[in-house]
Structures are given as structure tokens and as C-alpha cells.
Amino acid sequence: MSAEKIKAANLLYKAGYEPEKASALADRLLTPENGEIVLDYKTFCDTPKGFGTVLAQILPASTATKLKIDFHNPVYGYSYTPVHLLRTNAARGFGDHKKLDDLFACLNKTKIATLEMNELPLGEAACAALSKTLTETKTLKNVEIRRCDIAESLHDGTFAPSLTESSVERIGLPECGLNGEDAEALLKNTGKKAALKSLDLSGNNVWNKATGNFLPMLPDAMRDLNAARSDLGDWHVAAQVAAGLLKAPQLTDLNLSASGMDEASCRDIFAVLPKMNVRRLDVSGNALDDAAAKRLVAAVSNEDCSVYQTRYSEPPAVARKTLLGPDENTIDPATAEALRAAEKVNEAKYQVVLDQERAAEAFAVMTDAEKAADPFTAAKAGRIGESLDLKPLKPADFLLTDDKGKTLLTHAAEAGCLAQIFEPKRWANPKDMQALWDKVSEKHRMQMDGKDGRPSFIKAKSLVTAAMLKNRMAGLNR
């Protein structure tokens, strides 16, 4: 028996466990199956007062990478304790009684990267300790607090983690009875420079009070916002949310499923999609009709729109319950086909972005010889000029294609580096330069000067012409 096992078993024995049970529990805590410690309702039925203090002395030696605390009483079956009762029923002192504050305070000394809690009566001391832990952690990555009494602590500032220096990348607060002011209170302290990438506020009425005010507060690293099963059935509320979304350009994933949207309330939200960077949008399980679907098609078909997934005709992960049953979106076959076509176009555009990102990573570690030999990677990385400096290409080389039939010129245009190709120093003949320029699509020419590219190209071509004439005159004078 290891020293850690002996210490853990002794601590549990002193806390009140029988020797055999103390030994078994020590094993569960120190070397849990699949690295996950699960403390459920049954576990807590046998735990002594101050159990959190005992755990705080054991967990630093554990191999666990995940801690799940689920206080749901299985007697209730699929039902659950309403959040507003967690601090008013008989369990309101649970967190203090079990010393959960000591448990949360020790987490940064452990290997635990994922913390999940469900229907857990926390209390003020535990919330304060958890807030401090999230602020200071360098190990925790994912934190989910589901159906817990966190709202009150957000109101009074007890739970106000600053994540600017924290390692936390995902926070989930689903079904915690939060409103917009609570979301604003959380993000007010989180910090714009936090590493937080994903925030789950599903099942909360986050558009009630301070409508959408928290959206501009989302960290710069934030990519995924889950606001499913919120209430977007009011047109005025939806309009304010749409305005707030424009102030969160960093979002690439937005979940608005089962939120009671209809044709009127979706209008402003769909209208701002081409002005955002959202790629995956979930509007499943709303009350949208074919008129709303046509609005969505118009938005997704916009050349500036990035959305390639809407889940319009799919069932939501969790349905919104109404007196008439769960909401469903309706769409006629022709509109559905138009939506799928628009999504496919945007998915192809997204694939270009992914290819460019991979090329940029590859190009960053290439040698000069590799850069010169692989102009396609250089073009996709937006750095074709560096490759051309090492090995100049002939005009015809820019029309060579890759295995997907796309030319080198097209890759460079998509990556926004046409100007690097049409630098005057790279050309000896203006006719060759003009011939290649004629192969550039109209939409890509704009990158030269923000207009139609013509002024910039003419200026560059004039310099090439002047240089060619100068060289010819020099040859005649010899």
C-alpha cells in the first residue's frame, strides 16, 4: 500500500468511515476510473461534516483530471430541484456543512482540468472560494455549474472571477435562473483579455433585463456562445440583441435554438449575420415559418456571410416546452433546397480559410529551399512574395493548378496577396503583366486598393513600362 493510500485511508477513517469503506473510498479518490471522480447524492449521504476539508488533503495526490459533483436526488427521477429552492430548502447550509470552500480552494493543487456540478447548494463561502480558484487557476480548463444557486452570488459580487490570468477556456452556467444583469455581472469581471473561448448560458432568460448589454463584454478570445432556450419571442428584445451581436465580432458559433423566435423577432438577427463572423448558427426548434426561412436564405446567401450551418430543419438538443407542445420550424422544399445550397457555398469558403490557416502554420517552419520549391503553400499562407524573392516564376507558372484544379493565382487572390505578385520589380514585360491581371476575378481585384484595383494596377504597370523603355534605350546607347 502506497504512502498516499495510507494517508488518505487514515484521514477518511478519522473523519468517521469504517476501515474497509475508508480504504475503498481512498482508491476511488486517488486512482479513479478514467480519471474521473464522481461524488453523487448517494456518496454525500454517507459523508461526514467537513468532508470538503478531508478531500482537500487527499486530492493533490490524486491522478484525477475530472471532478463531478452531482447532488441530484435519484428519488426525484427525471425531475429536479428548482434553482430558487436550493438556498431556501432544508439543504441551504449544505455547502458550509460539507466545507465545499476547502474543496474548491485545493483544486489548483490538483491535476483536475474539468469541474462539473449539478443541483448543488453552494452557499456564499463555497462561491467565494470557487471564484478565487477560477481567478488564480493554471490547471482548470472547463467548468460547468448546472442548476446551482449561483445567481445570488453574482448579484452580491461573491462570485466574480477575473479570468485575465486564468487558464479557464470554457464556463457553463446552464439552467441557473440567470438574467441579463447576472450575465453582465459575470462578464464585467471576467476581462476582455481572458482565455475564455466558450460560454454556455442555455436555459437562462439572459435577454431579460440589461438586454444584450453583456455581448460587448465577451472576451476577445470568445468564439462560442450558447444562449439556447432563452426568450427571443419579442421583436423589441430581438432587435436589441441583434445590435449587441454586432459588438461581438469574435463569435464563430452562436446557439439560439428553442428560443421562441418567430418571423418578426428573427428579422433583425438574420439581418446582421452578413456583418458578423459566425460560421455555425443553431436556430433549430423555434417557431419559424417559411417567410422566416426566406429571410435566412437571403442572409446566408449574402456574399459577406460566413454561416454554413443553421440546423434549421433539425431537432434542437433540448426542446422548448409550450402549451401546444415543442416549437418546430417549417420550410417548403424549394426554400429548404436554397438554404442547403447557400450553406454549401459558405462551407466551401470556410474550407479555404482552414486551408490558409494550415498553410500559414506549415510555411512558418519551412526552410528557404522549401519556400522556393512550394509556391502554393506560400500563396495560401498569404506570403507568396517571400517565395518569389527566392525563386521568380514565369507568368504561365501562376496559372498552374493544384490537385483540386485551383490555380496558384487564385490561391494568392483568396489569401489577399495579389499586390505581392504584381510588384513592378517582378515584371519585365507589361503585356505579360496585363495578361495575368486579366485572369484575376473582379471581386479579388478590390484588394489592391479597395475599389476595383485598376488605379493600383495601372500605376504598377506604368512603372514596369518605364523600366522596360529605359532598358531598351540603354541598350541602343551602347
Image (spheres, helix red, strand yellow):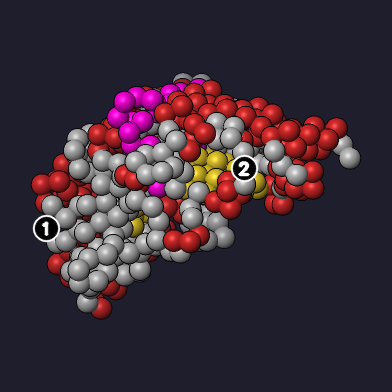
Judged by its main secondary structure, the magenta piece is loop
Residue type marked 1: Ala
Residue 375 image offset from top left, x and y in percent = 57, 43
Q: Which mark is residue 421?
A: none
Residue drawn 44% across the image and 30% down it: 127
* Residue toward you, 13 or 190: 13
Q: Which residue is mark 1?
A: 264
Residue drawn 34% across the image and 31% down it: 154
For the N terminus, which image quadrant?
top right
For marks 1 and 2 on the same chain, the one whose residue lies earlier in the sequence:
2
Q: Quadrant of residue 447?
A: top left
In the image, residue 259 lies in the stretch drawn in magenta: no
Residue type marked 2: Thr
- View extreme (right): residue: 1
Write the start and end of the magenta stretch as one range: 146-171
Q: Is residue 239 visible?
A: yes
Residue drawn 32% across the image and 64% down it: 319
Residue 169 image offset from top left, x and y in percent = 50, 36
Q: Nearer the viewer, mark 1 or mark 2?
A: 2
Where 400 sits versus 132, above or below? below
Where 136 sits versus 229, above or below? above
Q: Is residue 357 visible?
A: no
Q: Is residue 291 left or right of residue 311?
A: left
Q: Which mark is residue 47?
A: 2
Element at label 2: loop
* Residue toward you, 477 or 81: 81
Q: Is residue 413 left or right of residue 8?
A: left
Element at label 1: loop
